[in-house]
Image (cartoon, helix red, strand yellow):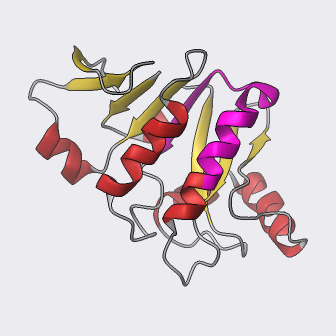
């Protein structure tokens, strides 16, 4: 089930946090920089993987230590380029196929490729719904872009859920984030 929420991804109680990365080993802006600052060991392993050519579009991978599990999700090939919708779709398809083998039961993710990546949320959201919306054993918390969330979400801190019928959206009171 997908739940669209607002707030700070790092405050999520989800089992796994999603970090949007490129494939060249740089985490200099946006949510990736915050992950780098909070989890330097994750950054060092990510950088080494990039040097070995192991971080590729369409292939998110799980990193974990005793405190946190992070899904490094390639949304860009190079930090100098914009994200590509086809790379987002490919990685979401990969995630939908492999999340059980990774042991992921709940996942928090930002609006993939929409910040520093330059993609439009109205193009990315349907991809998330298409690939993850029917997975009944995976709870996905998608942190919508702040401007979109303020515009679309009803007042009084509500959130939208998308379940196995990806066309049905119901307003639910949100929990404090």
Q: Which residue is painted at 47% across and 29% down in the image?
A: 133
Q: Which residue is painted at 49% across and 57% down in the image?
A: 31
Q: Name which quarter of the figure residue 142 lies in.
A: top left
The quadrant of the picture occupied by the C terminus is top left
Q: Residue furthest right?
A: 52
Whether residue 68 is visible here, answered yes or no, is no
The majority secondary structure of the magenta stretch comes to helix
Whether residue 21 is visible here, answered yes or no, is yes
From what the image shows, is residue 6 above or below residue 91?
Answer: above
Residue 46 image offset from top left, x and y in percent = 78, 61
**68 left or right of 154?**
right
**20 left or right of 56?**
left
From what the image shows, is residue 94 above or below residue 50?
Answer: above
Please tell me whether residue 93 belongs to the stretch shown in magenta: yes
Residue 101 image offset from top left, x and y in percent = 81, 28
Q: Which residue is painted at 15% across and 40% down in the image?
A: 152
Boundaries of the magenta span: 90-109
Residue 86 image offset from top left, x and y in percent = 55, 63
Q: Residue furthest left?
A: 155
Please tell me whether residue 63 belongs to the stretch shown in magenta: no
**158 left or right of 7?**
left
In terms of depth relative to the viewer, which is nearer, 131 or 76? 131
Q: Name which quarter of the figure residue 121 lies in.
A: bottom left
Residue 87 image offset from top left, x and y in percent = 60, 62
| Label tally | 0
Q: Which residue is painted at 76% across and 42% down in the image?
A: 62
């Amino acid at each position: 089930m997908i739940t669209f929420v607002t707030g700070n991804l790092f405050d999520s109680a989800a089992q796994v946090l999603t970090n949007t990365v490129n494939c060249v080993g740089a985490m200099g802006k946006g949510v990736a920089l915050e992950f780098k600052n909070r989890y330097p060991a994750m950054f060092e392993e990510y950088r080494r993987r990039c040097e070995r050519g192991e971080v590729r579009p369409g292939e998110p991978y799980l990193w974990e230590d005793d405190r946190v599990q992070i899904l490094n999700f390639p949304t860009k090939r190079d930090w100098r380029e914009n994200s590509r919708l086809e790379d987002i779709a490919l990685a979401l398809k990969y995630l939908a196929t492999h999340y059980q083998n990774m042991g992921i039961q709940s996942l928090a993710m930002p609006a993939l490729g929409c910040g520093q990546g330059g993609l439009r949320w109205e193009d990315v959201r349907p991809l998330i719904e298409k690939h993850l919306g029917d997975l009944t054993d995976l709870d996905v918390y998608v942190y919508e872009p702040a401007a979109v969330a303020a515009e679309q979400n009803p007042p009084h801190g509500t959130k939208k859920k998308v379940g196995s019928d990806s066309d049905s959206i119901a307003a639910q009171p949100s929990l404090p984030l």
